[in-house]
Image (cartoon, helix red, strand yellow):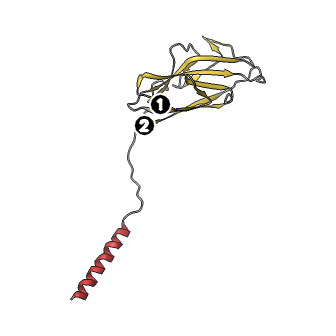
Amino acid sequence: MKKKSLILVLVLLGLSSLMVAMAYTSAEVQAGYTVKVADADKALLALAPHDNSGKIAYIDDRGNLMLDFGKVGDKDYGLQPGSTYKWSNLVDVINNSTDTVTVNLEVTGGLTDNLIITDKPGNNGRKIKNTELAPGRNNRLMLTFTVSVPENAGIGTDLTGSIVVTAEAGN
């Protein structure tokens, strides 16, 4: 009888081990989602022309923030080779979420080596990392841009690129 009980216990342990081994090791679960696409100045992390930006910073017909450094009012002038220009508080980065976010900025394209972004005194460069931005429209990063046009830039050459802004919400 003891032998049968021991065998039964061993069989039950073996079966339970087998059942644990049969538990799934991977799964695929689907859920619906919605992404609302918004203009750059109305998004969760908004990029908007600052009030004093004139027509240098503007929202285009597709809702994208555009920067045209050679523009004054409605006239296109351009920038001369070998010169440096600075525009203070040209663009606002606004956190429309309810969480504090950490913002990173990076310059890409034709002016990668010649465009400096400043988000606050002493924090500037071609890449700005880990700037905290509290939620709310009144908490803004006001970006200043300094453009140095290379001496060898050809007249009529368009130097184009992007300012890439990424953000991560805190815990």
**Which is more toward the observer, 73 or 97?**
97
Which quadrant would the N terminus be assigned to in this image?
A: bottom left
Residue beneath the point at 25% across and 88% down? 3
| Residue 122, horizontal then vertical, whole percent | 57, 24
| Residue 91, horizontal then vertical, whole percent | 54, 21
Residue annotated with mark 2: 170
Mark 1: which amino acid?
Glu
Residue beneath the point at 57% across and 14% down? 55
Question: Which of pointers 2 and 1 lies earlier in the amino acid sequence?
Answer: 1
Element at label 2: loop
Number of labelled discs? 2
Instruction: Tell me if residue 171 comes above or below residue 90 in the rendering.
Output: below
* Disc 2 + disc 1, Cβ < 8 Å: yes
Residue beneath the point at 64% across and 29% down? 161
| Residue 65, horizontal then vertical, whole percent | 54, 24
Residue annotated with mark 1: 132
